[in-house]
Structures are given as structure tokens and as C-alpha cells.
Image (spheres, rainbow, N blue to C red):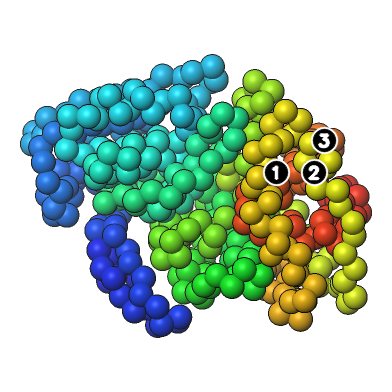
Amino acid sequence: MLNIYDCLGKTFQCPDCGQNHTLPIKKVTSSDKGIESIVSFLQSIPIEGKSLLLLCDENTCQIAGNQLETELKAEYKVEKLVLKTHGYSKVYAEEYYFPEIRTHSADKDFIVTVGTGSVTDMGKFVGNETGKPVIAFPTAPSMNAYTSGVAAYLANGIKMTTGVKPCTGVLIDTRINSQAPMILIQSGFADSLAKAFANADWKINAILTGEHYCTLPLKITTASEAHYKTHGDKIQARDEATIASLMEGLTMGGFSMVLAGKSAPASGGEHLISHSLDMYAHRNNREVYSYHGLQVGLGVLFSALLFERLQNVSTPLRRTIDYDATITELFGDESPKFKKAFANKKDNIDTFLNHWDELKPVFSRPPSYQEILGYLQKTGCPTRFSEIDVDEALIGFVTQSARYIRDRITLLDIADELGVLEETFQATKSFLV
């Protein structure tokens, strides 16, 4: 199979779909001396300029930011920006922080992010906006944003996913990653299990819209998963090699999105459930329920149950839905923006019965509920929503509302149109609550 690392910084013809893909990320390096090698890493890319913004939060500053600052000052002019919490106990990716990051990076040549998803995505967003290269230094294998071409953040109560230029380079310190809080490692593991489900959703969307679909993104993520997904016990034991394999899987997840030019290969209906939980928490002025990946893992379990149920639908019958009334009931005063998102995909949804013979084989692609449950349990991840303080009523709300927050078609749309969404939730909630 194609060695994807040989394609970094290049445009190449895909051996699977025949189209050209581009991987603008120039270098990804993993070692047990990442901090100590930061200067040589930057010089080897090479990255131009001698002035940089070192972006971190109070936690990641202590974990790696301070030491990186010392190393970088030997060759570069460094300004360290430590983001402070704003209304919550942690720094989350929010529009609120963008002006501060813009101001401090304005006279810099590039940005170095030190952290996990929030810090990385905010650095990528501002870097993309200002045309400045971004170097990511991950402090935990918690998600795949380090190599992705998207940035997720909250804006006016909505979880946005915006296309951005990927990081120019990613430097991974395997020691720091293996010593990260276990909950962050588990979050990355659970998030990585979404790929098969997201790719099935991508295929569903492609069938109904005619958009291009490529099998290479799933191939590279599946190949890397084999080295860690059945070794949850080793992850809990902090085996450095297994956690490095997990980080490799997350790296491939980011690559897969860049190859596709969208988040679809790594983010489907299961991510919409997680985003819906975040939006609900934000609207109610409370902390998010859990880390992104752990919420995604629970979304994957529900998605697995839906895919299994759809496999058994022999004669699909579409139910009648009053979309306007439903969206108003779910979102109240915020409903106009969600009605607009849904309107963008409704015409394509309307054709799904005409494509049933094409759709049906896709439902059997992802792993079963029992397989996913086993992987999550072995790694110590939550397998019930109640473990992250989400009750039955809220599970019902987010599983019903998630389909309306994006204009991408997923199995949530098909299942709801057939009445399978609510039916599956009611039949399986004893597994989920």
C-alpha cells in the first residue's frame, strides 16, 4: 500500500480513485525527545522567519510550553501567549479567544501550538486567516486535529467546523503523550473508532449527492488501527509503543481529512451527537459533559446500533415529518439557522428511497455494536451516557436533534426518515443510559 509519509508536501495521483490529492503538511516526526529537538525540527522543514508565537494554556504551559520556550529562545524570538480560562474550568475552542491570538501573532512569522484540540484548532484557525504557518506540538493523543485540515470551535452557541490550512509540521513527543492524563488518551482512542462509521456516512452522502468518494482515507486509518484497537489493556498500562500507535492512528485520521478536502472521513453522525451535546451545554451555561472523543465514542455505539437496525429494513417506508415544526420545537429561537442548514440537504434526502439498493450494502460496513463495546470497555472508556452525566431525556434530545445541525447527510437522516431513529433509541436505551 502507498506509504502516505512519502506524499507529505506533495500532490500525487491516488492509486484508489485516480484523482490528485495534496498533502501540504511538510513533516510529521515522532520521538522520545521531541522537546529537545524542536529547533532542529523547525530547521529541517525548513520554516522561514525567526519570530514566533508560542500558544498554550495554563496546563500545557507547565507540561511542555515552558521547556519549549527555553529551547526555542536559543534560535528564535519567542512570545508565549498563555490562554486563560473564560467562564469554564478549561480553555475550550471558542471565537472569544481569536482576537487575542490575532493581536499577539500579528508581527510573528509563525505560530507554535502546545496543547490538544482546543489550542491546536484555535492556532490553525488564526494561522489560516492570517497566512501564517502553524507548527503543532501535541501534549496528548486525544484527537486528530494535529494533522487535519479543519478547525472546530464554538461561535454564537453553534459548534462550527471550518476548513483551514493544515499545520506545516507536527512534532510528537512520545514521552509526553504516554504520560498524558489517561482520560485524554482514552478520548483519542474512542475518537479514532469513528472512522469506519464516518466513512460509511460519507459514502451515504456521496450516493445521494453525487459528490466524490475515495477509499484511500479509510485504508490508511484502518491499517494503523490494527496496532492498537484491540490493545486497550496496554493503553491503560501506559505502554509507550501502543500509545505511539494510537497517535499514529490519529495522525492518519487527520491525513484522511486532508486527502478528502473535508472532515467527512473522520466525522459523521457520531460526531454530530458529540457536537450537539457541546451545544446544549453551551446554551445552558455549563461545562461540556466530557472530552470530545469520549462523547464521540458514545455516539459511535449509538451509530452501530442504528447501522445494525438499518441492515434489517427490507421494505423502507418513509414517514411524514413536519420539519419546520420539529426544528422549531428542538431549537426554539435559534431554529432559523438550523432550518437553513437542513434546507441545504433536504432535496438530496428526498431521493433516498430511489437509491435504496445502493445504500443497503453500506449499512453493513462498520463494526458491530458488540465489537465497539469490547474495544471501549478494554480501554476503560465510558460505554453509557450516564457515565458522563447525560440522562435519558438529554440522550433522546441530542440523538433527535443532531441531524439538523449540519448540511451533510448521515445515517441519522436516513434512520429518522424511516422512523428507525426513535425506534432504535427506545429499544436499546437500556444499553445506553
Residue 339 is labelled as 1
Q: Residue at x 48, y 30 (%)?
A: 94
| Residue 324: assigned label | 2
Tell whether label 3 touches label 1 (CB within 8 Å).
no
The answer to whether mark 1 and mark 2 are in CB contact below 8 A is yes
In three-dimensional space, the C-alpha distance between marks 1 and 3, rounded to whole angstroms, equals: 12 Å
**Image position of 86 with respect to 416: above or below:** above
Where the N terminus falls, by quadrant? bottom left
Label 3 amino acid?
Glu
The percent coordinates of residue 166 (x first, y second) are 34, 52
Residue found 27% across the figure and 24% down from its top: 103
* Residue 427 location (% of width, % of height): 91, 54
Query: Left of 161 or right of it: where is 70?
Result: left
| Three-letter amino acid code at the position of disc 1 | Lys
Q: Quadrant of residue 424?
A: bottom right
Q: Secondary structure at mark 3?
A: helix
Nearest the viewer among 272 and 81 is: 272
Residue designated by label 3: 329
